[in-house]
Amino acid sequence: MKWFKYIKVMLLTATVTMFTSCYEEDVYRGQLLSGRWFGDLGMMVDGIPAIGSDLEFIPEGMYGTQGYGYETDYYRGYRGRIEVIEYYFTWSINNGIIYMRFDNPDLDCSIRDYSLSADYFEGYMDGIYSSSRFSLQNYDRYWYDYGYYADSYCYYRSIAPNEEETTDTNQTPRLTRKVNMATEKK
């Protein structure tokens, strides 16, 4: 009987350790993800590729495994002017999978196959009906060596210099993600 109790204690300890390590990895990923990223998200605006996209991940809570953010897509509009489309989303990390839920449900996605470091974030965004490749570079961190850095990051948002935010009241551009970018290039 002592042997049976010993096995039960070992199984319980292994289970707790396994769940704790997954959670710690999610916290670490959340800390790396928190900040602003710019690059190619594979967005199409009225069938034309966006010239760039900006993702901002703002953590909520002490550990940063969830939060909210903004996706801003830049594209060339009428007469070459830079047009801007922005979406609000919530994000969470669970067992290494990053979930993003947008105001526009067509853009909801999960990110499973990715590479994330302090400087680069690239991989595939899996939507409801498609998967698109993305490649982003970090330019503003919200986490530093000693924890969360909350100095005024949520009080302002900016647009890149010399770019105007415009709104066309007659037409709303249709945004979609490119489908299977990696297979199209072959």
Image (cartoon, helix red, strand yellow):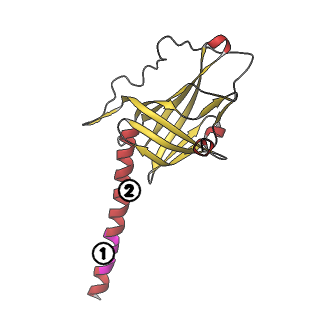
Q: Is residue 58 visible?
A: yes
Q: Residues within 10 Å of mark 1 (few under 14, many from 20)?
A: few
Q: Which mark is residue 25?
A: none
Nearest the eye: 119 or 10: 119
Q: Is residue 159 magenta?
A: no
Q: Nearer the viewer, mark 1 or mark 2?
A: 2
Q: Residue furthest front?
A: 186
Residue positioned 65% across, 17% down in the render: 77
Residue 45: % across, % down: 66, 27
Q: Earlier in the sequence, mark 1 or mark 2?
A: 1
Magenta segment:
7-13
Residue 153: % across, % down: 39, 25
Q: Is 27 above or below relative to 9?
A: above
Residue positioned 38% across, 60% down in the render: 19
Q: Is 150 above or below relative to 160?
A: below
Task: Please give the residue where the numbered disc 2 appears in the rendered image.
Answer: 22
Question: Under tag 2, what secondary structure?
Answer: helix
Residue positioned 47% across, 17% down in the render: 160
Q: Which mark is residue 9?
A: 1
Q: Amino acid at mark 2?
A: Cys
